[in-house]
Image: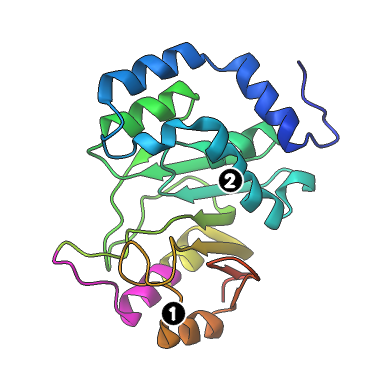
Amino acid sequence: MALDPGGPGLDDLIAYAHETLDYQALERILGFYGPAYPGAAYGDTDRWLRARWRIISLLGLDHASPRAILDLGTGGGHFPLLARWLGHSCQAINPPGNPLLDELCRWIGMRPVSHRLRENKVLPEFPWYFDLVVALDITFNRKPDGSVFTLREWRFLLDDLKLNHLVPGGRLLLGFPGPGGEAGQGLDDPALLELFAARGGHRLADENAVLFDPLR
C-alpha cells in the first residue's frame, strides 16, 4: 500500500508496517534474546507504534510540514519510524551496550547514534539544528551512583539543547515513565517543575510529560 500524502492515520501506518517490515525476522530476533532480555518489550511493535502515535498526535506532527527531529533514547526506534513515514527527518540517539535494541533499530531501518547521556556532558554534535527534540520514558537522569540529576544538571542539559541543537523557537518534549519514575525522579518534584516552567515548559494534560514551546 502507498501512504496517503495528505496524512495517514494510525491504522494506515500499522497496516503499512505489516506490509513493509519483516515480522518473521522480528520473531527470530526476539526468540534469540528471550522475553527477559532488557528491552525485549520493544519487540511488541504494534503496541509501541500506538504509544508513539499518541505523542506524534500531541505534537501535531501528523499534519505538520516536514520537521527535523532529534529523539534522545529512542529504544526500539518506533517514534522516528513514524516520524519518517509522515515525511519528517529524525535522528535518534541510544545508549550503547544493548545489542537487542541495536537489532530492533536495524530491523526497522534506523541507525541511532550510540551515546550515553550523562550529567554535565554535552550531546554529540550534528551538522544541523532541530525543530524538535523529544526524550520519552526518560531514565537517563539516574546517575551511575544511583542519585538523580540535580537542578543544576538539568539546567546544563536544557542549555546544551537550546544553544547547540535547537533552532530558534525550537520545541522540547520531556516524557517521564511515571510519578517518581523508573529513574527515581519525575514530575512530582515541585522544584523540577518550577525550573521547567521558568524555561518555557508546561505539563501536558493527562500526560506525564512537559512540553517546552519553545525552550527558553
Q: Of residues 86 and 67, which is closer to you in this image?
A: 86
Residue at 58% x, 45% y: name it. Answer: 52
Tag 1's secondary structure?
Answer: loop
Residue 30 percent location from the top left of the image: 35, 23
Q: Of residues 125 and 105, which is closer to you in this image?
A: 105
Q: Quadrant of the N terminus?
A: top right
Residue 61 percent location from the top left of the image: 71, 48
Q: Is residue 149 magenta?
A: yes
- Label 1: which residue? 188
Q: How many numbered discs sit on the rendered protein?
A: 2
Gap in Å between the C-alphas at discs 1 and 2? 23 Å
Taking the image as shown, residue 76 lies to the left or right of residue 52, namely left
Q: Are marks 1 and 2 in contact (CB under 8 Å)?
A: no
Circle 2: residue type: Arg
Few, some or many residues within 10 Å of mark 1 (<14, 14–19, 20+)? few
- Label 2: which residue? 52
Residue at 49% x, 48% y: name it. Answer: 71
Residue 144 percent location from the top left of the image: 16, 61
Residue 79 percent location from the top left of the image: 55, 42
Q: Quadrant of residue 119?
A: bottom left
Tell me where the magenta segment starts and ends, as one range: 145-158
- From this view, report whether residue 112 is shown above or below residue 145: above
